[in-house]
Amino acid sequence: MYERNHVQELIDLISVNPHMHIIALTGPRQAGKTTIALQACTRFAKSGIPSWYFASDDPGPAQSHPGKWTTHDHIRMGGLSDGQSLVDLWENARKVSLQSDRGLVLFLDEIHMIPNWSRLVKGLWDQDRREGHLIHAVILGSAAWRMLTGTGESLTGRFRTLPVTHWSFPEMAQVFGLTLDEYIFFGGYPGALTEERDPARLQNWHNYVKNAILRPVVDKDIMGLERVRKPELMRQLIELAPHYSSQLISYNKLLGQLQDAGNIRECQVAGGNFTLRLSQNRA
């Protein structure tokens, strides 16, 4: 399986400095953050370092006979349901880390879905520093700004970010054989290239980008961070905008293509930095 450079970079960050700050893998959806974490988890385990991967959106059980967990269980996976399950998991990780002279690597995916996660992680991490527990924490999230909202104050000075960007042209060319024109068209989303790059299959690619990338950004990221008065109208607007990329379009023409648009006030997205205003003459 292809490994991006981020895997080795993550391993180096933990191996070279065992007392490193919490590492946060940040970046856009479908860029491969979870795959990077799982690949690093496997490589750590093969080198004898216990590595656990848990995700808050995983339906699997978080605690399965925790009292029997040892360093022989190099890889463990499961789900996190709430703050208490996070604390329990961390306590079990401490016990196992004492059996390893190289500590334990704990991957926490979609951590932003746990209420007050930053406060909990801060307390657990600070306690580890005081008591000498060697827990290497790596946190992941699908929306960088949402994660950093949680780490904004309470984890200041305690974490380091490792950005995971879209795949570059050399990566997409090496793995999928894309030409430059194809890369410009399809972009750096490897998941979209699982379908054949055939004109008859472009609808599959279109559905992937729409449902796996754009829709979660609106439904989970933006709406989870800000109040939106007309969610469905916002979805329509975001889906419609790419059709007029780099074009001047009259306000009335755009408004006429939105269902249940109402007046101009209905086309404003409420909330802080996400306010979107359409002028009377053009969008």
Image (tube, rainbow, N blue to C red):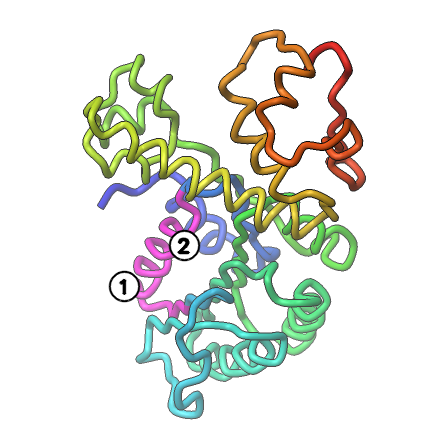
Among numbered discs 1 and 2, the one appearing first in the sequence: 2
The residue identified by callout 2 is 37
Residue 253 percent location from the top left of the image: 62, 15
Q: Position of residue 93 (x, y in %)?
A: 49, 77
Q: How many marks?
A: 2
Q: Nearer the viewer, mark 1 or mark 2?
A: 2
Q: Residue at x 36, y 79 (%)?
A: 71
Q: Which residues are magenta?
A: 32-52
Does the magenta-highlighted stretch encompass residue 41? yes
- In this rendered view, identify the residue nearer to me: 130 or 205: 205
Q: Residues within 10 Å of mark 1 (few under 14, many from 20)?
A: few
Whether tag 1 and tag 2 are in contact, CB under 8 A, the answer is no
Is residue 205 or residue 261 the one in the foreground? 261
Compared with residue 196, is residue 57 higher up or lower down, i.e. above or below? below
| Helix, strand or loop under label 1 | helix
Three-letter code for the amino acid on which mark 1 is drawn:
Lys
Q: In the rendered structure, does residue 172 fall within the stretch colored magenta?
A: no
